[in-house]
């Protein structure tokens, strides 16, 4: 990543998302403005229904917006046609899901290179090796997902997100299905990808311990940003969450 | 992307095999029906072409129902026998034969009719060229009032041999005959599923009350004269109400007549094929929907990772095309076997049809290459 630290990996201005219409209208996001600096590790926290997953989906181009604008790098995606948006997701965004979402019929190595296969590109050998070594799966590459533990599967998913060297990685509750030890491994891996590879990571979570791995935490409630916290610790995050609940 | 698809297909072998089975069954029913009906039509055509081999022109009454052979016999209007002598006197005629045909019933040893569709009574042609249609004969042709020649399939089903006594009912009256010979017809053992009783001309005339009359006159042209030329020559000397047609067009007409009688069978099989296709299409559609439904998650993931709508669609389509092509090919092959089984099944029920063409690979190919006949 050669982007200057001052550059933004993603940005949202006045982002609004509503579902339904008339009396049944529900506002999931209410005029959210946020800036994600390149090379940063940001956690998005909030109680369920606060709109944190919706915000991630809108910023990652997986869902359309009702109002406001969203940029990835300097490209506005909120008005992008479907075809270009698909290509942008392929080339410039990485995803990590709560349910791992690996293809069960492909071996670990094939799952990792799947985004490149879809793009019809060859893997950059050195980078691929670096990623596989970083996630610690060198001796597991031929295994099917069903033969791997949850933590190993999520590490495969992270390697898949990193392999195309995207501008930004969105992780949606990446530790939601893992025990505390596997969670720690996965979170450490995400933090190292930021520190060692200069990757930009946005992670949605409701776990204060997970959030404490990030450099900065954004708190959402009722579809609005209600605060930020730099240099979080599990205690300071929990503290802030309690205050939100009051 | 396609690697993922191929892996997926390998991983779900059983599911794919079941889908393929549905396709194979659907297409095999279609293919069996088409092969069977086409072969039947084709066989009838060639049968009548064989039957009229050696005959160039047929002279018959202009009234409808003038078929020389087939189920419509017996109803044909007779014409005076002396016309044959007048035709024989024409310069370009090589051979002339007045023929009588009608309906008869062959009775088995237990006195009951042999199970079959119909029996055609014919007169034995006097000239060698016209005897060519009666193939692979054993014994000798009928001669004299007490003799009859029967076809191979009725001899087989009634356990009759040359020299045996057989009762033949004509006009509701059973009469005893001696079997002088047994014959095939063209490439088949009988006449398009009908049994045959062949008498000499005089006996046939007596039996059907047609003394001095014939049902039709077969004419063979001298070398160098075409059937059309001969037909025109003969037409000039015929009395009113009697017409001359070329044997080729008569054969076509007869084949057409029999085909339209067998039309019900053809429609039955086409309906059968249509139902098979309809049901098959539903089963196939359903199975593929389920397969795609089970993979919604996978396909959504591919879309999230940046696979285009077209890419996902193409991979699903390619999978379907691969399964469809392989299964349909297997179904077409199975259908050919099935159509032979169908012919055997019908024969088992006593409906003997001239489907001999199916076993000849070249003809089988021809019947397949024109399935929309």
Image (cartoon, grey):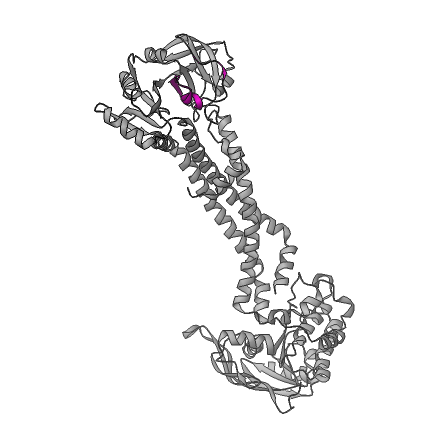
Which residue occupies 55% across, 86% down? A74
Q: Where does the image place residue A216, in percent across and percent down from the top left? A: 66, 86
* Viewer-side residue, B46 vs A181: B46
Q: Give percent across and percent down for residue A41.
A: 66, 83
Q: Residue A52, percent across and down?
A: 58, 78
Q: Which residues are magenta?
A: B119-142
Say above or below: B96 vs A240.
above
- Confirm whether the magenta stretch covers residue B28: no
Q: Nearer the viewer, residue B325 or A41?
A: B325
Whether residue B121 appears in magenta in the rendering, the answer is yes
Residue at the far left in the pictured view: B240
Number of labelled discs? 0
Residue A133, quarter of picture: bottom right
**Where's the C terminus of chain B, which quadrant?**
top left
Residue B141 shown left or right of residue A174 in the figure: left
The residue depicted at 44 percent of the width and 25 percent of the height is: B193
Pick whichever, B136 or A170, lies toward us.
B136
Against B354, residue A142 (above or below) is: below
Up the image or down, B254 lies above or below A29; here it is above
Q: Which residue ends up furthest to the bottom in the rendered image?
A: A6
- Name the residue located 40 percent from the left edge and 14 percent from the top edge: B199
């Amino acid at each position: 990543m050669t982007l200057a630290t001052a550059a933004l990996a993603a940005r949202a201005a006045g982002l609004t998302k509503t579902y339904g219409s008339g009396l049944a209208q529900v506002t999931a996001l209410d005029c959210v403005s946020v800036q994600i600096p390149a090379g940063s590790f940001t956690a998005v926290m909030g109680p369920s229904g606060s709109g944190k997953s919706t915000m991630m989906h809108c910023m990652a181009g997986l869902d359309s917006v009702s109002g406001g604008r969203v940029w990835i790098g300097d490209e506005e995606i909120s008005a992008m046609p479907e075809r270009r948006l698909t290509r942008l997701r392929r080339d410039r965004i990485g995803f990590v899901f709560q349910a791992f979402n690996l293809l069960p019929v492909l071996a670990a190595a094939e799952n990792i290179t799947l985004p490149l296969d879809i793009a019809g590109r060859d893997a950059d050998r050195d980078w691929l090796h670096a990623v596989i070594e970083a996630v610690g799966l060198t001796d597991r590459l031929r295994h099917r997902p069903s033969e791997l533990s949850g933590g190993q599967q999520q590490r495969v998913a992270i390697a898949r997100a990193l392999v195309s060297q995207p501008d930004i990685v969105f992780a949606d509750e990446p530790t939601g299905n893992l025990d505390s030890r596997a969670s720690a491994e996965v979170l450490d891996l995400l933090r190292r990808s930021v520190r060692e590879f200069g990757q930009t990571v946005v992670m949605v979570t409701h776990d204060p311990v997970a959030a404490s791995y990030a450099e900065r935490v954004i708190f959402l409630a009722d579809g609005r940003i209600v605060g930020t916290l730099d240099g979080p610790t599990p205690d300071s995050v929990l503290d802030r969450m309690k205050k939100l609940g009051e | 992307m396609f690697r993922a698809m191929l892996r997926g297909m390998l991983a779900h072998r059983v599911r794919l095999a079941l889908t393929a089975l549905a396709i194979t069954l659907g297409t095999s029913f279609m293919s069996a029906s088409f092969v069977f009906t086409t072969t039947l039509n084709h066989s009838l055509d060639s049968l009548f072409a064989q039957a009229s081999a050696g005959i160039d022109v047929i002279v018959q009454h202009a009234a409808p129902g003038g078929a020389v052979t087939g189920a419509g016999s017996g109803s044909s209007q007779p014409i005076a026998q002396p016309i044959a002598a007048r035709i024989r006197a024409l310069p370009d005629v090589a051979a002339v034969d007045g023929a009588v045909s009608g309906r008869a019933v062959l009775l088995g040893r237990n006195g009951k009719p042999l199970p079959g569709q119909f029996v055609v009574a014919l007169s034995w042609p006097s000239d060698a060229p016209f005897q060519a249609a009666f193939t692979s004969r054993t014994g000798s042709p009928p001669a004299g009032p007490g003799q009859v020649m029967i076809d191979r399939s009725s001899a087989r089903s009634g356990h009759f041999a040359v020299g045996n006594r057989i009762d033949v009912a004509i006009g509701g009256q059973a009469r005893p005959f001696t079997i002088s010979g047994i014959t095939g017809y063209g490439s088949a053992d009988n006449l398009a599923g009908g049994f045959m009783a062949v008498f000499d001309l005089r006996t046939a005339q007596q039996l059907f009350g047609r003394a001095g009359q014939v049902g039709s006159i077969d004419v063979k042209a001298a070398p160098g004269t075409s059937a059309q030329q001969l037909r025109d020559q003969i037409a000039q000397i015929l009395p009113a109400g009697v017409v001359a047609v070329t044997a080729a067009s008569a054969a076509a007409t007869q084949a057409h007549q029999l085909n339209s009688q067998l039309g019900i069978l053809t429609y039955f099989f086409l309906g059968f094929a249509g139902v098979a296709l309809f049901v098959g299409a539903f089963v196939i559609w359903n199975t593929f929907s389920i397969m795609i439904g089970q993979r919604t998650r996978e396909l959504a993931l591919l879309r999230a990772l940046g696979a285009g709508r077209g890419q996902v669609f193409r991979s699903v389509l390619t999978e379907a095309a691969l399964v469809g092509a392989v299964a349909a090919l297997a179904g077409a092959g199975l259908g050919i076997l099935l159509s032979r089984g169908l012919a055997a099944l019908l024969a088992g029920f006593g409906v003997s049809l001239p489907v001999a063409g199916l076993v000849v690979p070249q003809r089988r190919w021809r019947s397949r290459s024109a399935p929309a006949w």
